[in-house]
Amino acid sequence: MYRIKEWILSDIVSGVSTGLVAVLQGLAFALLVNVTPDYGLYAAFFPVIIYFFFGTSKHISVGPFPVLSLMVGTAVLRLYPDDPNDPDLNNKRVTVAASVTVLAGIFQVMTNAFFFLVFQLALGLLQVGFIVIYLSDSLISGFTTAAAIHVLISQLKFIFGLTVPPFSGPLALFYTLESVFTNITKTNICDLVTSIIIMVVVFAVKEINDRYKSKIPVPIPIEVIMTVIATGVSYAFNFQARYKVDIVGKLQKGFQPPQAPSLSVFQDCVADGFSIGIVGFAVAFSVAKVYSIKHDYVINGNQELVAFGLSNIFCGCFRGFAASTSLSRSAVQESTGGKTQVAGLLSALIVMIVTLAIGFLLEPLQKSVLAALVVINLKGMLMQFNEIPNLFRKDKYDCVSNTSKLYISKKKNTLVIRPQNILVQCPRTRANIL
């Protein structure tokens, strides 16, 4: 039963704060998917609506997550690489991103009868959500840390203002770095300086928010503040014409009609869909579990699978891309006093207002600013490198297994899970269970 008098004010404050962050992260993470930024707003809106009705966590903020966005973007680039002579390239990429998202939302009910109707939904209906509970911490942290490195490197071209061709295959990371350093002399100084300022200021204020969270009633929304300032400065001094920076550009007003997913994309992206479905749920469930323990309530793993499966199906049908939960957004929603998913619903309302009415105000925003925000939001995942010595002391087998046998293939987005990666508490191993 919703306690209106006790919770509504906190949920309103939390919803508005989270919604502003969701708008920026939606625009930013769309760069990882290799589609225009306005489609990121769809991914920040539709999954939240569905999760409100079906989810069991009261505090996570559902929407784009950088690792999943990168995985979807890899599938998009594989099927439709850069082609300046193709005027319909963005629409084709949106179709791929949306179809992969739908693919990640359903599961193979019967392999021979239905060709992968596909992933999370059937897992939840078959009551096997418990499987993710037994994925070790090191498995999830190893995958997300490796993916964070890929995300970081993929954003260098925006931070330096360079034109870097897309690469695929196991060594794509190194080819991308080679291309960045080969063209480093062509750096757009305006983009670079802007990115550095954004990253330094946002990092410093986030540290202040974290250090003094007991004394600050509401975290300083520094991402929103810096984005507003950057947009205003870019517009006032006409950075696009004067310094040739790459900006967000025209944002499509309103929502587009739904479309059916592409069956040909289904056939080409089975591995991508499976990896996205598993990783997205594992990350979301682990975050939800933390907040459920902190606030003393129960979440249902099987119901969460169904909720995220339906969220991704619905989002994909409306041209969005894969959703999970963002650690930083969830922290904002919880720390600003959010009591229930009413806060999430209100955050979706903010995204809708931007999409329908005021999105044009963000058109002068530099893409380098969005890239800087993406990089700053990777801090938590990149800091997991510090856990390697502790993991080795705790269980050297688990450490070696997960650092050597877990990898991301930029070509296939493969999440490799060996039998020894799925751990249960037993005398030999003391690895943590999510």
Image: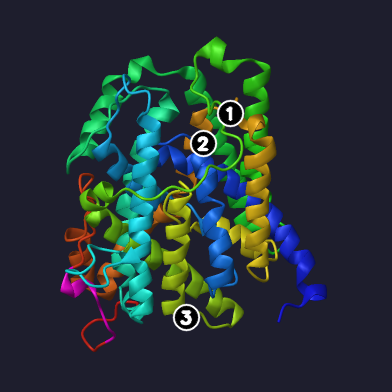
Q: In which quarter of the image is the C terminus?
A: bottom left
Question: Which mark identifies residue 323?
Answer: none
Alpha carbon separation for disc pair 2 and 1? 8 Å
Task: Please tell me how crowded label 1 is: few (under 14), some (14-19), or many (20+) other residues with Cα within 10 Å.
Answer: many
Specify the farthest residue to the right.
Answer: 5
Nearer to us in this view, 248 or 320: 320
Nearer to us in this view, 52 or 388: 52
Q: Residue at x 47, y 36 (%)?
A: 371
Residue 71 in the image: above or below residue 109: above
Specify the farthest residue to the bottom.
Answer: 427
Q: Residue at x 33, y 57 (%)?
A: 103
Image spot of residue 78 (x, y percent): 24, 39
Alpha carbon separation for disc pair 2 and 3? 35 Å
Start and end of the magenta stretch?
A: 418-425
Q: Mark 1 points at which residue?
A: 365
Q: Is mark 3 on a helix, strand or loop?
A: loop
Image spot of residue 292 (x, y percent): 54, 77
Q: Name the residue under label 2.
A: 370
Residue 420 in the image: above or below residue 227: below
Magenta stretch holds residue 378: no
Q: Name the residue under label 3.
A: 300
Whichever of labels 2 and 3 marks the residue nearer the N terminus, that label is: 3
Left or right: 369, with 390 as reference point: right
Q: Look at label 1 and name its amino acid.
A: Leu
Q: Look at label 3 and name its amino acid.
A: Asn
Q: Look at label 2 and name its amino acid.
A: Leu
Task: Please tell me how crowded label 2 is: few (under 14), some (14-19), or many (20+) other residues with Cα within 10 Å.
Answer: many
Q: Is mark 2 on a helix, strand or loop?
A: helix
